Image: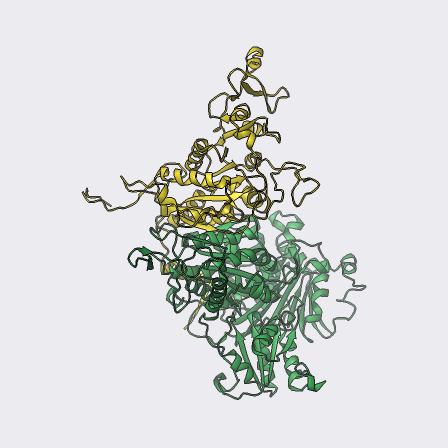
Chain colours: A yellow, B green
């Protein structure tokens, strides 16, 4: 096809190329920019006052225009739970599905539609209890989608039972004597399930949240973003120590690719070093580390070996003494959906067409006849 | 007892020759007897290759133009212990010079490869039938394993059958002796020896089987050579031995002009889906989790990528239907395939598809239940699950194929309904249809119904100002009540769907009582209004059309069509006035069904369940139908249904006694 230079824009979509998560998705015509308003639907938002979901919604609506995509090519799929109402509030295509199944439904959509940027919205109960199987398999396959896992460590929509991320001993309506289940660490789980992109952020840190979301959307493959999110009704203050200005400095370990993993206030800085036992990592005073010559760990999110990212994820423990946030892992590997489509394309090419080729009636009739036929005259 | 013992190559010379196959009919002048129909059953250990043997004999028979029906019957265990009754696998084929509707009630010929196969099957063979028995495994130990105190070949217990006892294994080993194979490996080709012998005996053409073996084993020269030689040795044995003085032939059945092939239900169903999607211009996306007896549909479709077919093998049944629904949301024809237990797991997602009002085809290849039940055996016991196995008022159209080849048309019909009415559709096949096969007149592409996906591209209404274009995702087509299908990527039609109740027309979340009442009724009315053809009653008059109501109607659905048809024919031969009708559509039921039921004094409903369609008919039409049920994991024999018909006609079975009759 030859193109004639025109002075009139035809509004044809330009498809984003490269290996980003949005490659293949039609971009906005040059000069056209969307804003937060364009991504805001007319539905009335119905979360409880003070819910952390508001902050995440605002951040997402604010960040989506940055991707420069046509909004009709953006899809949000959710499961069930408070956070799963999310798609209704975005003026994109959306599906509020059933409990735990959003990653599976999104897999079917992504595999058949390379021109969409697909987000999955889920919570700790939705993703890690009822939908645990679909979550791990989506990550194992590396389906090109961004999963936002809102973790408030409680069941909100069913009014306050403990969740698979609740700390042991949690007293809730269903566990008056304290919960007995050991919780999941979603980041460790994701890394164990071969996720190619894993990050953690907080609902209250708009800047960090946006930064992580951008990296997640740009990543080609399954991006899992755990968002610590406050439930003001049933688990209020669960993450307060990470939000308090003074406390958070001492506790939040902000991971940055290629940088030494150090944190804490000036004067009492701490460092992450390889643990003495050899396999994991541990936190020591930065001065102590320097004095003893122990090498401070340099974060490498892109390495193929997930061991370091996993070790870092284990720094997190119930007391939240030191909680790593940021991108744990961002490793490129083939995505399931790209490979599925490549097999289809190869089959079509082998049949004598290109990837846009559609089987002819004659091809179909050949299939129906099969190998052995006989004729009745 | 008439026993003809096969030659023992150890004693008799020469050993079976292995010449190139002589062309059919060029025999050594043996007498050829013409038969109008034959039922053959091949039986052996699960590992003996009986299914392959049966398949090949069927393919040879089909190519001759006989009409035929098959019944593969095998255990759920992949390789049950050798020589035991639970390990017996069989394949039955009925072929004739006329229209055949069942695999046959009683085999005329049983090929038994060991004592277990004989023991498990001999009681089904018709009196005077032929037994072709491989004697090599008839050792004291093997006989004891299946409870034979003495060899039935020697103790007279097979009196009344025509018995051919021959050492097929030994003859196979002998034929392959210079190939350098171990005895065990050589023995593996004994099924081909049996196939060669039967192919000779019934004058079947051999080129196809040789071609098939070339294609299957072409890369493994030794295996190919062993199978070819065993096959030819079996043929040559028939040709040379005096044990088989007569050959048989069954002339072709009259058939409409056209191109034919033999096809199984699962293959026909897969091809129907592909053909319907092709004609609709839709890519097909299958989400599936392997389950017997549905897996072959996944296997077939996974090889059809060139037709734009995406197959996703999911982590579980729930994910499988979810992937299909996700693909439908994106504008593909979403399909999921499963069997009973899998359908149970998919229920919630099918309910979601009902709420989303998106096309989705759910294939349930029914098997014996409850729970894991009988994975490899057939049953029709998921009808009520298909109809009602979801929470809430959740109507789903149900379509049931009635023969293996009919799986093609039923699949095309399911796609038509799913796409036209934006609804999940349940396609209820079963294990008998799935694995059974019959000749099929291959359609042209244009014979396949082309449904228009009719994707929305523009807003379908205006905002309150009367000017601003607006898209209303639940503004229905007034005729079909279908909602628009607007797929992601379509500018200006962005909208959200979900399982929460939606307001009529706008699709906003709505908890309004009146709206919910309306939406529930709309969804029901949409399914009720699906166009399905009237049920046709065959009254048995000349041309099948003479009208005389008032007697007995035998009404079936799904795979019972064959045995019901055979039974009704037999009943008429016996002078009984019996009408027959068969349901393809279980939801909605044909508009004239009530009238048809009321026009007959008695309605007999044979089902491979304990009365599920009967329950629906009684509830819907207040007609006191008489059930005829069996759940043995096998299709009805026509005899069972003939007996039921006779019982009703003779007044031995009556409708439920009414209060005044008590």
Q: Is residue B409 above or below residue B346?
A: below
Can you say which quadrant of the picture contains the C terminus of chain B?
bottom right
Residue B292 seen = no
Q: Is residue B568 above or below residue B223?
A: below
- Camera-side residue of A11 and A49: A49
- Camera-side residue of B579 and B243: B579
The image shows residue A53 at horizontal and vertical percentages of 49, 41
Compared across the picture, whether B186 is left or right of B520 comes to right
The image shows residue B518 at horizontal and vertical percentages of 47, 65
Q: Is residue B9 above or below residue B552?
A: above
Q: Quadrant of residue B601?
A: bottom right
Q: Quadrant of residue B276?
A: bottom left
Can you say which quadrant of the picture contains the N terminus of chain B?
bottom right
- Camera-side residue of B42 and A199: A199
Q: Residue at x 19, y 43 (%)?
A: A6
Residue lying at the far right of the rendered structure:
B149
The image shows residue A50 at horizontal and vertical percentages of 50, 40
Compared across the picture, whether B26 is left or right of B75 comes to left
Residue A157 seen = yes
Q: Quadrant of residue A233?
A: top right
């Amino acid at each position: 096809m030859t193109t004639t230079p025109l002075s009139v824009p035809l509004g044809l979509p330009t498809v984003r190329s490269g290996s980003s998560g949005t490659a293949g998705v039609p971009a906005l015509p040059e000069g056209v920019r969307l804003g937060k308003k364009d991504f805001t639907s007319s539905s009335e938002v119905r979360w409880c006052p003070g819910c952390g979901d508001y902050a995440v919604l605002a951040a997402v609506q604010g960040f989506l225009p940055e991707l420069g995509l046509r909004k009709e090519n953006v899809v949000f799929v959710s499961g069930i739970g408070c956070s799963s109402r999310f798609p209704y509030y975005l003026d994109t295509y959306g599906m509020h599905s059933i409990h735990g199944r959003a990653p599976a439904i999104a897999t079917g959509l992504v595999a058949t539609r390379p021109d969409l940027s697909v987000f999955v919205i889920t919570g700790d109960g939705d993703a890690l209890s009822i939908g645990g199987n679909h979550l791990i398999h989506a990550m194992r396959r590396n389906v090109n989608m961004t999963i936002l896992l809102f973790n408030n460590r409680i069941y909100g929509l069913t009014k306050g039972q403990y969740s698979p991320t609740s700390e042991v001993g949690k007293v809730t309506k269903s566990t008056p004597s304290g919960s007995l289940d050991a919780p999941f660490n979603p980041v460790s789980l994701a890394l164990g399930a071969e996720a190619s992109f894993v990050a953690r952020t907080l609902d209250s840190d708009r800047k960090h949240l946006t930064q992580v979301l951008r990296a997640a959307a740009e990543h080609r493959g399954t991006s899992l973003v755990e968002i610590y999110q406050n439930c003001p009704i049933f688990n209020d203050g669960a993450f307060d120590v990470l939000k308090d200005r003074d406390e958070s400095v001492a506790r939040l370990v902000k991971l940055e690719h290629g940088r030494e993993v150090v944190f804490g206030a000036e004067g009492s800085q701490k460092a992450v070093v390889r643990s003495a036992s050899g396999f994991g990592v541990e936190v020591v005073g930065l001065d102590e580390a320097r004095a003893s010559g122990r090498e401070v760990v340099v974060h490498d999110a892109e390495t193929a070996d997930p061991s370091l990212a996993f070790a870092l994820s284990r720094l997190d423990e119930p007391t939240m003494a030191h909680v790593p946030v940021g991108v744990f892992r961002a490793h490129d590997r083939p995505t399931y959906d790209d490979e599925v489509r490549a097999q289809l394309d190869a089959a079509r090419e082998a049949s004598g067409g290109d990837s846009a080729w559609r089987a002819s009636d004659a091809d179909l009739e050949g299939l129906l006849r099969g190998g052995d036929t006989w004729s009745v005259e | 007892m008439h026993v003809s013992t096969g030659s023992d190559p150890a004693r008799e010379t020469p050993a079976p020759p292995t010449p190139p196959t002589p062309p059919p009919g060029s025999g050594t002048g043996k007498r050829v007897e013409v038969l109008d129909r034959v039922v053959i059953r091949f039986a052996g250990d699960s590992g003996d290759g009986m299914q392959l043997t049966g398949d090949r004999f069927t393919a040879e028979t089909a190519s001759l133009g006989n009409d035929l029906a098959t019944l593969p019957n095998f255990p759920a265990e992949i390789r049950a212990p050798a020589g035991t009754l639970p390990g017996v696998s069989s394949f039955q084929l009925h072929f004739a010079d006329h229209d055949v509707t069942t695999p046959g009630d009683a085999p005329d010929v049983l090929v038994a490869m060991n004592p277990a196969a004989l023991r498990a099957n001999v009681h089904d063979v018709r009196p005077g039938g032929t037994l072709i028995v491989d004697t090599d495994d008839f050792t004291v130990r093997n006989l004891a394993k299946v409870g034979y105190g003495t060899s039935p070949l020697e103790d007279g217990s097979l009196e009344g059958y025509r018995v051919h006892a021959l050492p097929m294994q030994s003859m196979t080993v002998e034929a392959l002796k210079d190939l350098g194979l171990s005895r065990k490996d050589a023995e593996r080709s004994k099924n081909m020896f049996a196939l060669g012998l039967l192919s000779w005996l019934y004058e079947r053409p051999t080129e196809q089987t040789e071609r098939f073996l070339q294609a299957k084993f072409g890369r493994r020269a030794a295996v190919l050579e062993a199978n070819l030689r065993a096959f030819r040795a079996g043929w040559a044995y028939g040709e040379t031995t005096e044990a088989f003085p007569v050959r048989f032939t069954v002339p072709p059945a009259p058939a409409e002009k056209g191109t034919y092939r033999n096809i199984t239900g699962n293959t026909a169903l897969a091809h129907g889906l592909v053909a319907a999607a092709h004609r609709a211009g839709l890519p097909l996306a299958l989400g599936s989790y392997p389950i017997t007896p549905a897996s072959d549909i996944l296997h077939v479709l996974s090889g059809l990528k060139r037709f734009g077919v995406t197959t996703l093998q999911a982590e579980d049944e729930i994910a499988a239907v979810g992937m299909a629904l996700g693909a439908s949301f994106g504008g593909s024809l979403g399909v999921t395939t499963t069997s009973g237990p899998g359908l149970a797991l998919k229920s919630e997602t099918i309910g979601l598809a009902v709420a989303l009002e998106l096309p989705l085809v759910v294939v349930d290849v029914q098997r014996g239940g409850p729970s894991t039940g009988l994975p490899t055996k057939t049953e029709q016991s998921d009808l009520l699950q298909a109809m009602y196995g979801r929470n809430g008022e959740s109507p789903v159209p149900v379509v049931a194929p009635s023969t293996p080849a009919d799986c093609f048309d039923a699949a095309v019909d399911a796609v038509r309904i799913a796409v036209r009415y934006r609804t999940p559709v349940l396609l209820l096949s079963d294990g008998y249809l799935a694995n059974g096969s019959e000749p099929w007149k291959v359609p042209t592409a244009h014979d396949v119904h082309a449904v228009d996906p009719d994707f929305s591209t523009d807003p379908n209404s205006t905002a309150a100002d009367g000017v601003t274009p607006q898209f209303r995702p639940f503004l229905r087509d007034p005729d079909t009540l279908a909602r628009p299908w607007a797929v992601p990527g379509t500018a200006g039609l962005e909208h959200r769907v979900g399982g929460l109740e939606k307001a009529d027309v706008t699709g906003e979340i709505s908890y309004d009582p009146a709206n919910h009442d309306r939406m529930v009724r709309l969804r029901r009315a949409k399914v009720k209004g699906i166009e399905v053809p009237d049920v046709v009653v065959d009254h048995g008059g000349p041309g099948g059309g003479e009208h005389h109501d008032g007697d007995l109607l035998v009404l079936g659905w799904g795979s019972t069509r064959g045995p019901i048809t055979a039974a009704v024919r037999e009943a008429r031969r016996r002078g009984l006035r019996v009408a027959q009708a068969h349901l393809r559509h279980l939801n909605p039921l044909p508009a004239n069904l009530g009238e048809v039921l009321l026009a007959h004094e008695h309605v007999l409903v044979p089902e491979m369940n304990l009365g599920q369609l009967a329950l629906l008919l009684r509830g819907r039409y207040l007609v006191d139908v008489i059930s005829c049920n069996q759940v043995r994991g096998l299709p009805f024999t026509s005899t069972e249904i003939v007996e039921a018909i006779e019982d009703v006609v003779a007044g031995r079975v009556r409708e439920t006694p009414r209060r005044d009759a008590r």
